Image (cartoon, rainbow, N blue to C red):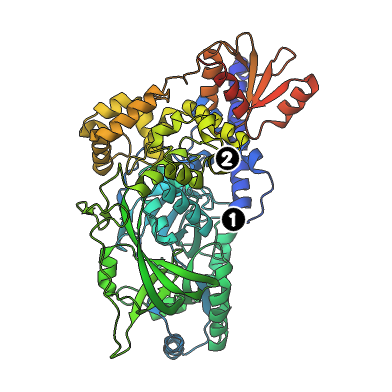
Amino acid sequence: MLSKALTLPSLEFYCRMDVFETIVDLRNKLNQHNYNYYVKNSPEISDKEYDDMMAELVRLEREYPQYADPNSPSVRVGSDITNEFRHVAHSTPMLSLGNTYSKDEVRDFYLRIKKQLNEDFEICCETKYDGISISLIYIDGELAQAVTRGDGLTGDDVTNNVKTIKSIPLKLHGDYPARLEMRGEILMPWKSFERLNKEREENEEPLFANPRNAASGTIKQQNSSVVARRGLDAYLYYVMSESLPSDSHYENLQYAKSLGLKVTGSIKKCRTLEEIFDYIDYWDVERKNLPIATDGIVLKVDSLTQQRALGFNAKSPKWAIAYKFQAERELTKLESIDFQVGRTGVVTPVANLAPVLLSGTIVRRATLHNEDFIKTLGLHIGDMVYVEKGGEIIPKISGVEQSPGSIRGQKVEFVKTCPVCGATLVKYEGESAYYCPNDSACPPQIKGKIIHFITRKAMNIDGLGPETVELFYNKGLIKDVADLYDLTEDRLIGIDRIAERSARKIITSIGQSKSVPFSRVLFALGIRFVGETTAKRLATELHSIDRIMAATLPELMSVTDVGEKIAQSIISFFKDGHNLSIVSRLRDKGLRMSEDSAPKSNGNSLAGMTIVISGVFQKHSRDEYKKIIEDNGGTNTSSISRKTSFVLAGENMGPQKRAKAEELGVRIVDEEEFLAMIENNQD
Ligand code: IVH
């Protein structure tokens, strides 16, 4: 016995214990910082410190998989594994609410409750969030399941996606019950929505009409790392458990808050109709300052006993009602219609309106989406139309006001030919949009393709922008993206006052673009439906342009997230002789056409040099830079010493590294300068 008691655990055991403790410590700290940032809105550390802590946790969890935890804060970053959405039955149905747009009906609701209860009562008023409803189930304080509303009885299990939403705690604090179900709304804040739509616009992907559609499209994503990037949020408004501390809905929400859950902030108990109307009027104005979309007010009888006494209708509770805000709309005159042609040839009708003030901005144009939309409205030029902003960012026309007997202008018909090049428009099966098929010669399509090609996320050609592209195109200098690589400083100087310095910058930048990774070249080609993420997937899984061009439909569809529509589009892109010739010319110019091909710059420009890499880079990953250094005869080391030739520094270079470099007088070189060093040594 004694000898056993004296046996000491091995050194390895102690090390492991240290690792485990470090992992637990990092998880606790990250959970607390998440809560401070996303729920309390008061961060205590910088983003950089947070990211470093998270990176350390991910590293340790990867190295020690035996300490995995399905609710570690590291799951917030999501994963590439395809989600399957199991159908799950709700413990109690997820009901909807009776809706009204009128204060009279709010009065009727109040008076009905008063009559039926025939005793004192309070109404809990809350803002109505415009997202998608979710049920979160916490078992022993851990998030066990997240299920969408579905048909109210069964929904989709979207747990992996929901775990990436940082305002939803993975573990509760404090005195939680064994089982707690929290219902609420998943939302896409305005900021995330605008960023996402901007990205989609750049990729010519269809825009989300409003944050609700964006949130719903996001939560059903197959890939949780996409969800993690899109910046969703959640507000919770209903607690369910066998052991709740109070009979008051309001108090139970405060209790949920004490467990770390993000509960609706704009909540107030009212006793009189006047108080309720004041609340409605206040939030109808103040909601415009909220970071998320709201579309009304929810009124709930506060006492759970009284809620039970009032009961339910078939689809909604009798103890609650939603008062919806009127969408802001104004009447104005439809002056004319433009048909705009985008980079992919899609033709979009846009209404030109007599200027009108709507929610603080002057609206002059509104989208008319497509032919079906115009037909449904039955528009004529000169009609008085309603413009609405509602939850949408792009104003839309929501109706026509017809004064009886008025003589109407010309009926709006969708054009049959391209308004720019005159080609007969086509429609693809299953789509409501019309396209101009003349993709190799229709000017807005060509210019659009070149503008897409040079953007930061594609070839990142600085010094060129939409106006210069327009200018070069009009002067006949470029007719397609491959022509960019034939430009020289001499040909540019003097064109519309382009100075020597700008010409040099443009040409250097075009030269540097030859070393962007293959996935970005693929994205830059502007294949319909191949956005940044799809291009990355294709590059990682099929490696080279030759394999992509030779791939069959099923081979393309075997790539993650590539469905039939994308696969078909890739096949038809590479069937086109014009596209093939552009790809071949770009290849001849030295652009990267496979994942692992190093940039053309293999040489000896870094021979004998010792280089330290630090920070985050725009044009290549750190691993790519390591390879570039080796391919050019240099050596990459991790710490700075007197022997270091220079530090290749990206954004956020570590402060200690910077101080050390300065102390030892080691030169700091940025990405551009570094690439130019190699570039200058080519050929
Ligand atoms: S309570 C049984 N409170 O509105 C009561 N719902 O139109 C359940 N919603 O399905 C709902 N904000 O998705 C409640 N503060 C709030 C809400 C809210 C938004 C949504 C919810 C519901 C829909 C009904």
Q: Residue 439 carries which label?
A: none
Do we see residue 10 in this rendering? no
- Mark 1 neighbour density, 10 Å: few (under 14) some (14–19) many (20 or more): many
Q: Which of marks 1 and 2 is in front?
A: 2
Q: In this view, does 152 lie above or below 25?
A: below
Q: Which residue occupies 29% across, 74% down?
A: 377
For this rendering, which residue is in front, 654 or 243? 654
Q: In which quarter of the image is residue 655?
A: top right
Q: Is residue 504 left or right of residue 336?
A: right
Q: Quadrant for residue 473, please give it.
A: top left
Q: Assign ligand 1 to one image quadrant.
A: bottom left
Q: Residue 382 location in percent, x, y?
A: 35, 78
Secondary structure, mark 2, is: loop
Horizontal side of residue 221 vs 511, given as left or right: left
Q: Image height check: is 633 above or below 389? A: above
- Residue that carries the numbered disc 1 in the rendered image: 39
- Dot label at residue 498: 2
Of 388 and 191, the residue lying toward us: 388
